[in-house]
Amino acid sequence: MIKNGDSSSLNTQLDLSANIAGITFKNPIVMASGTFGFGKEYAKYYDINELGGISGKGLTLQPKAGNQGTRVYETASGMLNSVGLENPGIPAFLEKECAYWETLDTARIVNLGGNTFEDYVTGAELIQQDADRRSDSGRKAVDMIELNISCPNVKEGGIAFGIRTCDARELVRAVRRATSLPLSVKLSPNAEDVADMALMCQEEGADAVSLINTISGMKIDVRRRRSVFNNLYAGLSGPAIKPIALRMVHQVAKRVEIPIIGMGGISSATDIIEFIMAGATVVQVGTYNFMNLRAGEDLLRDLRQFMIEENIYSLDEIRGIV
């Protein structure tokens, strides 16, 4: 219960913090992979150390140039993207970006992708080796790995690792063995059964699950009579997918005991509250970063104000109450 007082004193009484596998998130607002770079660009607009965390640009073992043609298309209530995981590769990230991440006072999450089983495992090993070297000299740049199992498995005809639980199990198990860093598995909404997938991740030692990733969608150029995207389909994100994401987070929360990182269409403080009530420990904000360059700052302010107005001292009071 919040005691009566002025707004500034009430703010200091609020407890927005959360803990996942020993990693402290000062508040539940984490910037989603693929929408925030590695943080430098947004640091020009507000203090990103005020965020709960950052999930960096998705990384693969080798650099990727990304997809050709149109990459982003605005929809009625969100956006379609077909960026293709453009990234500098894990070795370049560790060499060039981690020095900056060492200076940050927020949870730092590496989003790990791959096109083969071996790519994922080798990538996790490199991240772990770098973490060990930095730890030996009292430094730290990475707090957690977020395993993106929505990438296509090129050895299995291109089907995403995260569709069939049997395929994903082997991958999660191998990556868990390759690193001692806290591990969250980012789940695809296209999984055969997302709750079963989450339960499998828990069984294989994941410390958390993140959901949902984008939903496959399409846009046709009726004048040119072809898909807008060279790859035909693209990932739909933004407010349009929030009801689906919220439902899946709620379903998973009823099946697993590990923390949930909820995401999908969050653009307001009340959106955050909904995900927390559905069972999320923290949330990730993605598409809204493109709409509002100060999204993190604004959401944190509005979340605090909502908690004061609703007489909520700690988010633990409402987490998973629905």
Image: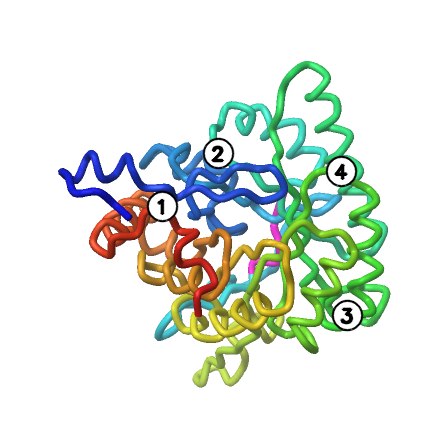
Query: Would you place residue 249 above or below residue 9 in this image?
Result: below
Q: Which residues are magenta?
A: 83-87
- Residue that numbered label 4 is attached to: 180
Who's the residue at 76% across and 42% down the image? 124
Q: CA distance from mark 1 to mark 4?
A: 29 Å
In terms of sequence position, does the residue under pointer 3 or pointer 2 come before the other? 2
Mark 4 Cα-neighbour bin, 10 Å: few <14, some 14–19, many ≥20 = some
Tag 4: residue type? Ser
Tag 1: residue type? Gly
Contact between marks 1 and 4 (CB within 8 A): the answer is no
Question: What residue occupies the far left of the structure in this picture?
Answer: 6
Secondary element type, mark 3: helix
Q: CA distance from mark 3 to mark 2?
A: 32 Å
Q: Is residue 201 visible?
A: yes
Tag 2: residue type? Thr
Lateral position of residue 297 relative to residue 179, left or right: left
Mark 2 Cα-neighbour bin, 10 Å: few <14, some 14–19, many ≥20 = many
Contact between marks 3 and 2 (CB within 8 A): the answer is no
Q: Position of residue 46 (x, y in %)?
A: 32, 35
In terms of sequence position, does the residue under pointer 2 or pointer 4 come before the other? 2
Q: Which mark is residue 106?
A: 2
In this view, the residue in front, 164 or 38, is: 164
In terms of sequence position, does the residue under pointer 1 or pointer 4 come before the other? 4
Secondary element type, mark 4: loop
Secondary element type, mark 1: helix
Contact between marks 2 and 4 (CB within 8 A): the answer is no
Q: CA distance from mark 1 to mark 2?
A: 13 Å
Q: CA distance from mark 4 to mark 3?
A: 23 Å
In terms of sequence position, does the residue under pointer 4 or pointer 3 come before the other? 3
Q: Which mark is residue 165?
A: 3
Q: Is residue 230 visible?
A: no
Q: Position of residue 75 (x, y in %)?
A: 39, 72
